[in-house]
Image (cartoon, grey):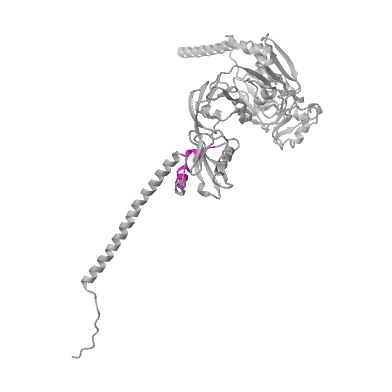
Amino acid sequence: MVRGPTCSTTTPSRKHLYHYNSLNSNRIRLFLLSLLLAVLAFPLSVRAQVTGEAFQNRLGVADTTTEKLLSGRRTGGSVADAQPLEGKIDPNTYVLGPGDGVYLNVYAMHALDQDLTVTPDGKLLIPRIGEAQVSGLTVADAQKAITKLLAREYKMPDASLSMRRVRPLKVSVLGEVLQPGIQTGTALQRVSEVIDRCGGLLKTSSLRNIEIRSPTGAVRARADLMRYYAIGDLKSNPTIEGGDVIVVPTVAHSITIAGSVVQPQRMEFADGDSLSTAIALARGLLPAAITDSIELARFGENDPSHAARSYIDYQRGENPLLHDGDQIFIRSMTQYHVPRYVIVGGEVQFPGRFAIEPGTTRLKDMIQRAGGVLSTASLEEAVLIRRVGVGSWENDPEFIHIRELAPMRKEGLSDQELSYYTGRLDQLMRSSMVVDFKALLLNHDESQNILLREQDSIYFPRALGYVTVSGSVNQQGNVGYIEGGSYEDYIVKAGGFASNADRGALRVVNPKTGSYIDPHSSRDYKIAPGDMIIVPQERPTFWKDLQSATTFTAEILTILAGILILRKG
C-alpha cells in the first residue's frame, strides 16, 4: 500500500489557548471596571459643581462657565422669570433694590458675563472686579456705575445690564378692606392688585383717597382707583415699594352728576376735581347732551340747606373746580335721533320697517312702499295701531283712583267705573286708529289716507273666508262667507235655531273692534269674514217656569183621568 505525501502543520497546545483567553478576559474586565468607575464618578463631580455654584449664588456670583450654565438651567424656569408683566421694564424708570436679579454682559470680554443678584445691603458683587452700590438707582444708572467700575481694570469696557428677576417685597394694607394685614408682592405690582389679595374693598371704602405711606409714615403717593377703573389712568394706580403701608379710608365726601351722561351717579369727591373730571368718571357725555348751559348747584359754607345755582358753558372751555357736595345737571336735546319709522306687517309684499317723514308720509304711500296688499289679505280686519300720543295712565288721575280703589272694595267697581277703566286701558294698550282700509284701497277714499306718525304699526291679517256661528244653533261651526248675506242666512246654514235659543239676544261680534252688534237695530251693518254670530240660550224666568209647571200638571191630571175612565169601563 503506497502512502501519499504528508503535510505537517503547527497547532497551538491547549495550554497556550488557555493562557491567551485568560489574558483577553482580564483586559475586558479592566475596561468594564474603568467604565463603571467613570459612570459613578460623574454625578459626584456634577454635585460638587452644583454645590459650589449654589454657595456662590448666595453671594450673587456665578464664576465659571459651567456654573453659569447650571445657574441658567436652574433659574430659567423659575416663578420670578415667569411672572406676568404689564409690558417691558423701562431701564430708565425701574429702580433696583435688594433681591433684584440682573444679567451683566460685557462685550468682547465674555468671561465677565454673569447672572448677579442685588445683595440685602443693595450691592452687586462682581468677581475679580469689585462691588457696586446700585440700590436706589435705575437700571440705566446702575449700568453706568458698573461701566465706570470696569474702566479701572479694562480699557473702554462696553457693558450692558438687563433685568432677569424682579425682587419680592412686603407691604401692609390697613383700613377699609376685607382682610387687613401684610401682603407679599413684587416691585411691579400696583395698589389695586395688593388690595384684591386682601379680599377687596368694602361698601364704605374710599376709592379715590387711598394713601401709600413710606416706612417713615410720610405719604409717598395717593391712589385714585375710581379714576383708574373709569379711564385707565395708570398714574392713579401706582406701583408698590418695599415697606409701603397702604391705608384705605372711609368715604367722607361726594358730589352728584345727573342728566345726559353715560352713568349718572353720586360719586366720591377728591381734592382737585373739576367739571371735566366728574364727566370723565361718569363715563363721558351722551351725544344728546347740551353742554353750553350745564347747571351747577353749590351749597354755601354758612347755609348748607340752600344751593346757589350757576350755568357753565362747557362747550366754550369753562371747567371750574368742584367743591364737596356739588350737584351737576346736564340737559339733553329732546328730539335727538327720535326713531321715525313705521312697521308694516302681515299680508303685504315686503313686510318690515320703513322710515317716514313726519307731516308728509301718508298711509297709502306706506302701503305702496311695502309692495301693496296681497290677495290673501283681509281689508276688513286690517288695523293701524298708534303707539305715540295716546298719553299715559300716570297722567290720568281718574284711572289711578279707580285702579287703587278696586282692591279695597268688597263689592268691586260700579258699572260706570268698570266701563271707564276697561275703555281707558284698551286705549292705552291698543290705541288703534279708525281707518276703513277697504274704502281707502278699493274706493280711493282720500279721507281715510291719514298722516302717519313715528312708531305706527300697520297690519293686514290673512282673510279667514268664513263666519263663525256658535251658541244655541243646531250645528255650531264655521260657515263659508256669503257675499252680502245677512245673519239669517248664516243661521240657516248652521241648521237653524235650537229650541232654547234666545233669538232676541242674538249678537254679531266684530273681531277688529271687539264690539257687540245687535243686527236687529243695526240694519246697515254688513257681516264680514271673521265675524262671529253668537246665539245665547234663553234665560229661565218665573212665568216661563210657572207655565211649564202648569203644563206638566195638566198633562198628569189628563193621564189620571184617562186611567179612572178606563177602570170604570
| Image position of 410 with respect to 229: above or below | above
Q: Is residue 517 left or right of residue 560?
A: right
| Image position of 23 with respect to 309: above or below | below
Q: Is residue 415 visible?
A: no
Q: Is residue 400 visible?
A: yes
Of all residues, the one furthest to the bottom in this rendering is: 2
Task: Please tell me whether residue 202 belongs to the stretch shown in magenta.
Answer: no
Quarter of the image for residue 143 reads top right
Q: Position of residue 244 (x, y in %)?
A: 53, 26
Q: Position of residue 215 (x, y in %)?
A: 52, 24
Task: Please tell me whether residue 72 belongs to the stretch shown in magenta.
Answer: yes
Q: Position of residue 17 (x, y in %)?
A: 24, 70
Residue range corresponding to the magenta coloring? 69-84
Q: Quadrant of the N terminus?
A: bottom left
Q: Position of residue 223 (x, y in %)?
A: 59, 25
Q: Nearer the viewer, residue 465 or 294?
A: 294
Q: Is residue 454 left or right of residue 567?
A: right
| Image position of 325 with respect to 111: above or below | above
Tell me the chief SS of the magenta region.
helix
Q: Nearer the viewer, residue 376 or 152?
A: 152
